Image (cartoon, rainbow, N blue to C red):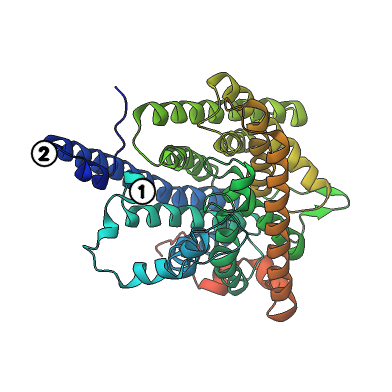
Amino acid sequence: MKWIHLTLAQVSDSPGISDLSVEIAQNVLTTNNVWMMLCTALVFIMHLGFAGVETGFGQAKNTVNILFKNTITPIIGIVTYAALGFFLMYPGFETPGWFGFDASGWSMFWFSPADADITSGYADGGYTYWTDFLFQAMFAATAATIVSGAIAERVKISAYLIFTLIFVGIVYPLIGSWKWGGGALDDMGFYDFAGSTLVHSVGGWGALAGVILVGPRIGKYVNGKTVEKPGASVPLAAIGVFMLWFGWFGFNGGSVLSADPGLVSIVLVVTCLGAATGGLGGFLAAYFAFKRLDLGMLLNGILAGLVGITAGADVFAPSSAILIGFISGILVVFSAIFLDKLKLDDVVGAVSVHLTCGIWGTLAVGIFSTNPDHSFITQLIGVAICGATAFIAAFAIFYILKVSVGIRVSEQHERSGLDSHEHGIRGYTIVYDE
């Protein structure tokens, strides 16, 4: 059955339309909207997955600090996106450009009554205006969370919060507007279905800038060797990865922007195949490199496959998804090894997962897309423009913070753990009765 996708206005304005047709259009709108709200909830729960991964891979002495950051990040993301980001990202370009701001949308958002006309038929009848905002706000908060994991265990909370405000409020939505807001990259033909570049690589570039300027943890690199720092909870890290995989059903499935059964189905199949073969690639590459069954690389391989498949989940055939995911899993392992050789300390592998595989997935659109209009050169140009902007902006923000308020905790606090010094409690406490 062909999916019906009509606005209520189109149905109502048609001559001789029956009440049944109006009811069908209303039901389609409701179905689309319910699906989008469900996907919004799935993307929201990904923050719990990020918290689990980061806490599990981080040291026990920093558990509360990590959880605090992962809790406040979506709070900042949602509020900042409502205050500014949403209207930068969707500025209503009259002609495709590089900067715009929807002032009328800002006023409509903040001062419209709950029953205003903007609550129905938004996005060509797909879902409501409010649902669109909430879905996009979850994406914005995700970009900041990527940075959190990379620079964990030594960054000042105050510096991280300031960075997040600026990065989520201005940098992320500005770059997003160039494609999703109808800007210059969209006009160029650049394609990014659900954010391999616009979400993951943007966050990954921010993470890389942070890792460079914050520096490695004390004792991470000694006499040319990388010292492993055991995570607080391997089971929690595994739970976090499965939670992220679960949330990706909403991340990619919701990016269809309707409940179109055929398109949603193939997107979810492609997403799962990419995740599965990503895990396989990570496991095999790690065994080749380390001669052991490395659970951490298996888990990061799954995430790598998910990131890699996200740019073209609606234009990749299942056979292509298997290869793209597998290559993503291999890339994440050797990217992590390369970063360690450069003494760039990334606690959770965020740069390797989100930046390296985000770039690969976006370029893969130009190689494997079933749409002949997608060009590798165009994808490469888009990656370069977004990457340069995100990295320069993030580096500038972190650098200004470094020379002003400072971005790293004291050596004493880092050695003894951030939980006791910044939060007054520990994440793991055993109380013995006397």
Q: Secondary structure at mark 1?
A: helix
Q: Which x, y percent locates residue 267? A: 46, 30
Side of 45 where 177 appears, left or right: right
Question: Which label's residue is closer to the chain start, 2 or 1?
Answer: 2
Judge by depth and name the residue closer to the eye, 265 or 13. Answer: 13
In the image as oriented, which residue stretches furthest toward the front? 15
Q: Can residue 348 be seen by looking at this rendering?
A: no
In the image as oriented, which residue stretches furthest toward the left? 19
Task: Tell me which residue sits at (47%, 47%) in the image.
Answer: 49
Give the quarter of the figure containing the C terminus.
Answer: bottom left
Marking on residue 19:
2
Mark toward the viewer: 2 or 1: 2
Corner quadrant of residue 212: bottom right
Q: Which x, y percent locates residue 147? A: 61, 57
In the image as oriented, which residue stretches furthest toward the top? 319
Above or below residue 41? Residue 82 is below
Q: Which x, y percent locates residue 407? A: 68, 72
Judge by depth and name the residue closer to the eye, 274 or 49. Answer: 274
Q: Amino acid at mark 1?
A: Ala
Q: Amino acid at mark 2?
A: Asp
Marking on residue 41:
1
Give the quarter of the figure containing the N terminus.
Answer: top left
Marking on residue 371:
none
**Label 1: few (<14), some (14–19) or many (≥20) C-alpha neighbours in 10 Å:** some
Q: CA distance from mark 2 to mark 1?
A: 33 Å
Task: Tell me which residue sits at (11%, 39%) in the image.
Answer: 19
Above or below residue 107? Residue 319 is above
Side of 48 where 1 appears, left or right: left
Side of 73 where 197 appears, left or right: right
Task: Tell me which residue sits at (35%, 45%) in the image.
Answer: 124
